[in-house]
Amino acid sequence: MPRRTVTMLASTLMLIALLCAGVLIPVPYAEMSPGPTVNTLGKHDGEPVLQISGHKTYPADGHLNMTTVRVTGADYRMNLVEAVYGWLAHDSKIVPHDTLYPDGKTEEQSSQENAEEFSQSQESAKVAALKELHIPVKSWVIVSTVVKGSPAEGRLHAGDVIKAVDGTAVKQPADVAKLVTKHEPGQDVVFTIVPAKDQAAAEKARKEATGTRNVTITTRAADDGGAKRAIVGISAGTDHTFPFDIDIKLADVGGPSAGLMFALGIYDKLTPGSLTGGTFVAGTGTIDDNGTVGPIGGIEMKTVGARDKGARYFLTPADNCAAAAKDTPDGLTLVKVKTIGDALDALEDIRGGDIAALPKCTAKG
């Protein structure tokens, strides 16, 4: 057999072997790509995303789209060929598997965590929007979670309203830990609570602030390897009583990053006129009860997804600006925001056509 033929055959067999290896050998990476983008002012699966009753609402046009990122599952192991393709593709990002699923977190655990964060982001979005409109919202410090096997198990329950610790009124979740850690491990701490036996009773208790009782719990030392710190085994959070009903209907979405866009959608529905002036605006960002906008993950994928759907402007958390500006899709303007107030000011400039006034993202932030 001629040497040239032998060389070509050997090269072909080598290439086939490499391709087979690339397909069969798993690599410790996962893929992020643009996910669905949903208009908070519109409908999803036939239902309005924002449903408000008990308060006057107004028609809203244009788009205030929340954006998402699609990721590979925790149990999926991509091969080398897929990883290389993803690295070369413009509309995907390859990251270490542990970035998305740290400490061996399962897909079920990740989904549960994302669902909890999504629920909390909805609550904060409602509070932030109503505060911006100067509509009073009652807030309550509650037991958010109880650690299994802790001193608080069976004594306190998720949803219990915490009125005081050792007779000192609590105004925010951080107050609870501060008051508990004043004790030495082994000492008693007294919680004044309104029990949350069921949803109806909890709601009535929040409105009427009745039915308080004292619960005494013996603290123990924290298992964190540091100085002896007294704990009871709960985490405190905030719950709210709203003056009217605001429901957010959006299934199969998780994480906290839609908070800003939900807050803007609620604000738009509760005020006359249109925030966008009919323009297609998308965005992302966490939001807290005070309207502060925080950074999110997968910003590059979200800008691509938004532009593919037709967005012209993208409201971007200030801390994500530098990363987003490195590869901005053509035709998309990145607008830097730090608070819901910044976002409302930017939307005023957009609908007024004063684009030069917009605080735009740059490679420096």
Image (cartoon, rainbow, N blue to C red):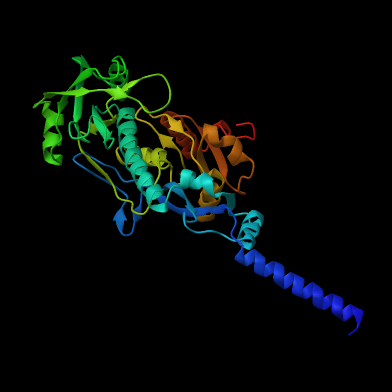
Q: Is residue 188 visible?
A: yes
Report the side of 97 relative to 61 (left or right): right
Front position in the image: 169 or 277: 169
Front position in the image: 15 or 118: 15
- Quadrant where the image shows the N terminus: bottom right
Front position in the image: 121 or 39: 121
Q: Position of residue 295 (x, y in %)?
A: 49, 35
Residue 233 picture quarter:
top left
Report the side of 361 relative to 206 (left or right): right
Front position in the image: 262 or 320: 320
Q: Is residue 312 visible?
A: no
Q: Position of residue 219 (x, y in %)?
A: 26, 22
Q: Position of residue 119 (x, y in %)?
A: 32, 42
Residue 229 picture quarter:
top left
* Extreme residue toward the left, this view: 211
The residue at 60%/56% (across/down) is: 27
Q: Position of residue 208 (x, y in %)?
A: 11, 27
- Quadrant where the image shows the C terminus: top right
Q: Does residue 249 lie above or below 2 as drawn? A: above
